[in-house]
Image (cartoon, rainbow, N blue to C red):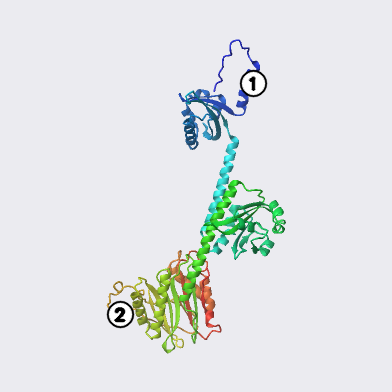
Amino acid sequence: MTQSNHPMPRGASSDPLGDELRAELSRAMELNGIGGFVWDLPSARVMLDPSALAIFDLRPDEFDGRISTLYERIMPEELTGIRARAADILANPRDSTGCGNYFRVRQSDGTIRWAHSQAALLRDEAGNAVRAVGVVRAELQYAEKQSILESDRRRQAGVVEATTSALSQALSVEDVLAALTSNQILGPVGAVGISLTVLEQNRLHRLASAGMPFEYVRDMEYGRLDDDRPIAEVFQTSSPLFITRENIRLNYSMLWPYIKGTGFTVSAVLPLMAQARLTGVLAILYEEKRSFSPEERNLLIALSATVAQSLQRARLYDEEHAMAVGLQQAMLPAKIEPVPGMCVAARYRPARAGHQIGGDWYDVMPLPEGRVGLVVGDVQGHDIQAAAVMGQLRTALRAYASEGHPPAALMSRASTFLRELNTDRLATCVYVSLGPATGQAEIVRAGHPSPHIRTVDGSAALTVEGGPPLGLPLGLTTGLPDPGDVPYPVHYLHLGPGETLLLCTDGLLEFHDTDMAAGERQIEILLDSGPGDLDQLAEHIVAAIEDRQGQEDDVALLLASRGGPRSAAASDVHRYSARR
């Protein structure tokens, strides 16, 4: 903006000192990178002094005096906001203060710099804005601050992403605790220690901790609501505490002896609120950090809400899972009675994914003439109805077996029974009638995986021709009018002394990243490498699936071997494996 020369009043003497000071003022603005501008609003013309032109990287001979030319140098992201704020101010006839704007300018070489403008409005007697007069300056430090803020925003986004990712995989309370105390959360948060405490029967109970002083972990697992500790205070007030080392020394004498010998500097003690209920308190410890910025406090409070929701969801899951597991267990045999001349071991493992119960079952049934019936089956579905149908079908099978029906007839009757329940549920099943004294076995299967056998020569799957699943409508099977005529071929086998027969549901053979053929091979390897003791062999097999991620189906396993009576009680070989 060129300086205007106002005529001196007639008779007034010149003011050399004033002229010198005005020149110095103009030079001071130029030296400090501050430029001036005047924007004539009716004509949309704008005048810039040399310093202002330099900020926009314009030479005097290339600036045409149009505001649109300046707008071309301003980054579009900021220009939208500048225009909106200007429109609001111009529309208010009482506003003469103008406004300030931070914005980015693209230089002729493509580089970007931050600038700031501040302007005041001049209005005519009618209140119409006629000019905007102001200054503009380069903002090198503002660019640095923005870079730091952007880095902080990225770090905070990383913390949120890491915490959310870790907790999204947690189903049970145990999973939540493992996630909270892992480096997956501690690392991004930048903390050295963390603990989670809940209230049980008006008593503080620390559920998990990591990086906490050993003596504190040992002595402070339980506590009282009136303890002289920040955790107890947060339980009473439901408000977060951000405390320093000095705060603890002065105000929490009970905690100070555990802290004074450590490098602890500050801590965030956060209430875990879910649906307006306090479910626990999360304490996060830091070293070297001196204080919490407002942004950090808001971030930690937001993270505590995420933890609270995860903890509440996990507790609900654990309760429902325990109820479902208990119902499923009640549907299975309470114990396996000893079978003379045989060893038998059984396991049941509920699915990891979800809390629904399934229709998998096993049974060992005494038969006429000293024989024994071995059965493993699976009712379609994972819900209470599947478990109820399983209980009815298992009872029907035991009744038919006790009447002495041969295996093929037993399977046909069971299919008819399930069909007449009108549940629209199907079931698969494998049944073995075995004579412990002779080893003679008859096997039938209804849409179920074939048994496996371990002999002195190794392990293999038996090739057992099968019939249709139980309960399948007759029109979809053979078209025969008499339900009893549905064919279930019988496979005859001699089980030698010391040989082991394995029956299982498909949950043991097939899961999300493995097909049935690979599962069959794995079972053969497990049988070959497993111990001779049947109970230990059952543990060996189910341990192989314990670490599967996303196991979506239940597992029922039944092992039978000809041999002398075991020394262990019958209840020792029957276990309901419900570990998650």
Q: Could you say whether the residue bearing mark 1 is in a helix, strand or loop?
A: helix
Number of numbered labels in the structure image: 2
Q: Position of residue 496 (x, y in %)?
A: 47, 84
Between 327 and 199, which is closer to the camera in this rendering? 199
Between 539 and 41, which is closer to the camera in this rendering? 41
Q: Quadrant of residue 424?
A: bottom left
Please name the amino acid that badge 1 sits on: Leu
On the rendered image, what quadrant is the N terminus found in?
Answer: top right
The residue beneath circle 2 is: 485
Q: Is residue 449 above or below residue 197?
A: below
Q: Residue at x 55, y 31 (%)?
A: 117
Q: Is residue 550 above or below residue 83?
A: below
Q: Position of residue 191 (x, y in %)?
A: 62, 54
The image's mark for residue 21 is 1
Please name the amino acid that badge 2 sits on: Asp
Nearer the camera: disc 2 or disc 1: 1
